Amino acid sequence: MEPRFVQAICALALGLFACDGKQSSHSGEAPRVQAPQVDQAPAGTIEGRVLFDGVPPPRSAINTAAEGGCASHPEEPALTETWVVDNGRMANAIVWLVNPPPQAADSAPDLTVEREPIVLAQRGCVYRPHVLGLRIGQTLRVTNEDRGRHNVRSIARSEQNPSVNVNQAEGAAALELVFAAHEVAVPIVCDLHPWMKAWVGVFDHPYFAVTGADGSFHFGDLPPGDYEVRAWHEVLGRQSAEVRVTAHSGSRIEFHFHKQP
């Protein structure tokens, strides 16, 4: 085929495509240019511990002898859980970010979205666990595993969160509660057994933790920036600290609580 004939065919393409198959810049549309890749800084972490300075009040045994149904799960002695401290490391503290990263709001669940329920069990006439955290819209399932009756009463400060007072007999269906507002922390008690008490922290983001026996907490996948971290204990109140997270790094913080005289 003559070269001049090839050129004529290309001219008849109305400027839509060049002969090499690529779209011509004379087509009347702006050429499609691939957006440049944004270099996102790697995420950082915040970790630390909640500590108690000094000698904590001792844990005391809970006398449930008068309640026959309380002996149905005697896997361990019933002890108070307000003060659970091991070599200065304090359990049952709630730690959370006051100003989570912007994308955390996108992960906040809609109230219609089903999430795995969190179970608060009444077993051996003790609420287990003593302290827990959950998300807005997540179901708290309160169960009675004892051979007797309990009374479940939640005392929420926010009007958007449930305040209930319900009798729960042996073998009764679980009581399901759903919280709609951030609150730290909602107490849940049993009026029939005054020593029974649990605490529920409610959050609109996933950056929260309840310390275990080692008093530790960890938040990952944090973009660089300045964050406020807050720690709560049922008797000792709250503490706050400012933490800076940079790329490729982990920031560490310790909260030191002590009992007022």
Image (tube, rainbow, N blue to C red):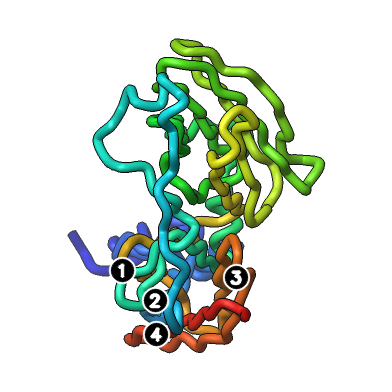
**Sequence-wise first label, 1 or 4:** 1
Identify which amino acid the numbered label 1 is placed on: Asp
Point out the frontmost of discs 3 and 2.
3
Q: Position of residue 111 (x, y in %)?
A: 63, 35
Dot 2 and dot 1 residues touching (CB under 8 Å): yes
Identify which amino acid the numbered label 4 is placed on: Arg
Mark linked to residue 49: 2
Identify whether 216 is placed above or below 182: below
Q: Position of residue 123 (x, y in %)?
A: 39, 30
Residue drawn at point x = 56 percent, y = 32 percent: 193
Q: CA distance from mark 2 to mark 1?
A: 8 Å
Point out the frontmost of discs 1 and 3.
3
Dot 1 and dot 3 residues touching (CB under 8 Å): no
| Residue 11 visible in the displayed image | no
Identify whether 88 is placed above or below 73: below
Mark linked to residue 252: 4
Dot 3 and dot 2 residues touching (CB under 8 Å): no
| 176 or 219, nearer to the observer | 176
